[in-house]
Image (tube, helix red, strand yellow):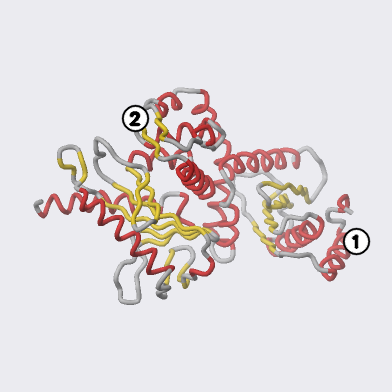
């Protein structure tokens, strides 16, 4: 391989790595090229989402007669297993860096589930496996085309993780899955079956015919997905506003981004209906509504521009506090903007998380309700 060919080969992989790390929904939980104390690179991408770690190694491997060189494939698997072993067996101290989150020390004790992904950025071979194994560890094998398709339909961190979990569950039951196409054909079954592969459960070999992905994209399901993306974009835009504000709002933005795409559609519709209803009541300074989606309580508040941001934030905090006491969800997120609809608006965000509700919290919430009448209908 010439020097120019080598550079082009590496550039395709770097382009995919950068896109996944900075331009996709992974960015809130993604650490690009994490380094060991020695300065050596651990892996291409490490994603840490709650108790889940996803290790990515991405290569652009040149095809030989339509196939990958097996030694290069094995190198990718070996590097993934090496990264896993370094983090979880040897427990080497690793400092992670994210542009939004800053620096953090990786704590392997917090991780319960590990996924390994071997991804390829270039041309696709005539035949490829979608799950490999190295030293007894399962490794997902992704082609660039599948990654692009998956990110369109599995467009939140929770949606993506749910697919990995279901794929491994299915492969634990059957002997093997043979696909006459690409993994996107398996994904089409998963999506069409309400995000499940239960219809494939078998203790023998499973053969998946090709063409399922093309059929899905020509179906009503595809149109519904596009509509879902369009509606839920409202929630994505609010998440971006929280990110733009930075500081403490960064933490709240990540909590808001936990929702699946279906949940984002639901919360977008609830937020829009609340905003519309707030315009139907004359002579008010504040309009509030509390809803629950995805195990999180959301407090929406529209406040008159006659109140400054500090006043708005104080009232929003009180609303969230009462909601946490009165509703069993451990997480409460508050969002406040102006009651008056104008071309520009500002946002206040609030987050409260507690495992339990204490007697002191109940007493304080009762006092807030008595003085300000917040959520009085909740008792």
For the point 82% across and 56% down, which residue is it? 326
Q: Using the numbered discs, state the Cα–Cα distance from disc 2 to disc 1 in whole angstroms.
A: 66 Å
Nearer-the-camera pick, 87 or 95: 87
Residue 29 seen in this snapshot: no
Q: SS at mark 1?
A: helix
Relative image position of residue 5 (x, y in whole percent): 13, 49
Q: Quadrant of residue 96?
A: bottom left
For the point 30% across and 50% down, which residue is it? 15
Residue 211's tag is none
Residue 147 seen in this snapshot: yes
Residue 180's tag is 2
For the point 37% across and 61% down, which residue is it? 32
Nearer-the-camera pick, 58 or 87: 87
Depth check, mark 2 against mark 1: the one in front is 2
The vertical placement of 138 against 37, above or below, is above
Relative image position of residue 129 (x, y in whole percent): 33, 42
| Side (left or right) of 373 relative to 302 | right
The vertical placement of 197 against 235, above or below, is above
Q: Quadrant of residue 362?
A: bottom right
Q: Quadrant of residue 30?
A: bottom left
Dot 1 alpha-carbon crowd within 10 angstroms: few under 14, some 14 to 19, many 20 or more: few
Q: SS at mark 2?
A: loop
In the rendered image, the residue lying farthest to the front is: 203
Relative image position of residue 185 (x, y in whole percent): 41, 32
Q: Earlier in the sequence, mark 2 or mark 1?
A: 2
Quarter occupied by the C terminus:
bottom right
| Side (left or right) of 232 relative to 182 | right
Relative image position of residue 215 (x, y in whole percent): 43, 24
| Side (left or right) of 163 relative to 214 | right
Residue 370's tag is 1
For the point 49% across and 35% down, which residue is it? 202
The vertical placement of 221 against 234, above or below, is above
């Amino acid at each position: 391989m010439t020097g120019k060919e080598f550079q082009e080969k590496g550039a395709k992989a770097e382009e995919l790595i950068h896109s996944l790390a900075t331009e996709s929904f992974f960015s809130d939980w993604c650490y690009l090229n994490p380094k060991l104390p020695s300065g050596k690179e651990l892996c291409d991408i490490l994603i840490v989402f709650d108790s889940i770690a996803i290790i990515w190694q991405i290569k652009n491997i040149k095809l030989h007669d339509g196939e990958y060189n097996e030694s290069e494939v094995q190198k990718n698997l070996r590097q993934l297993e090496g990264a896993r072993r370094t983090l979880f067996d040897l427990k080497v101290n690793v400092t992670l860096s994210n542009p939004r989150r800053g620096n953090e020390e990786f704590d392997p004790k917090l991780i319960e589930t590990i996924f390994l992904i071997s991804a390829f950025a270039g041309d696709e071979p005539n035949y490829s496996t979608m799950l490999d194994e190295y030293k007894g560890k399962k490794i997902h094998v992704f082609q660039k085309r599948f990654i692009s398709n998956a990110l369109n339909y599995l467009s939140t961190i929770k949606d993506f993780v749910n697919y990995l979990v279901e794929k491994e569950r299915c492969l634990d039951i059957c002997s093997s899955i043979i696909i006459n196409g690409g993994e996107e054909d398996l994904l089409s079954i998963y999506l069409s079956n309400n995000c499940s592969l239960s219809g494939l459960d078998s203790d023998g070999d499973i053969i998946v015919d090709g063409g399922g992905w093309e059929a899905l994209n020509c179906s009503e399901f595809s149109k519904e997905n596009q509509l879902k993306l369009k509606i839920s974009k409202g929630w994505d835009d609010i998440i971006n506003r929280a990110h733009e504000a930075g500081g403490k709002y960064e933490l709240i933005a990540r909590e808001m981004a936990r929702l699946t795409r279906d949940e984002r559609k639901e919360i977008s519709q609830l937020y829009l209906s609340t905003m519309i209803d707030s315009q139907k009541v004359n002579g008010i300074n504040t309009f509030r509504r509390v809803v629950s989606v995805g195990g999180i309580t959301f407090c929406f508040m529209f406040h008159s521009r006659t109140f400054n941001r500090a006043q708005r934030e104080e009232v929003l905090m009180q609303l969230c506090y009462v909601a946490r006491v009165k509703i069993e969800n451990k997480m409460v997120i508050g969002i406040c903007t102006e009651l008056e609809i104008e071309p520009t608006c500002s946002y206040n965000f609030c987050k409260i998380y507690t495992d339990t509700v204490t007697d002191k919290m109940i007493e304080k919430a009762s006092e807030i309700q008595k003085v300000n009448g917040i959520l009085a209908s909740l008792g």
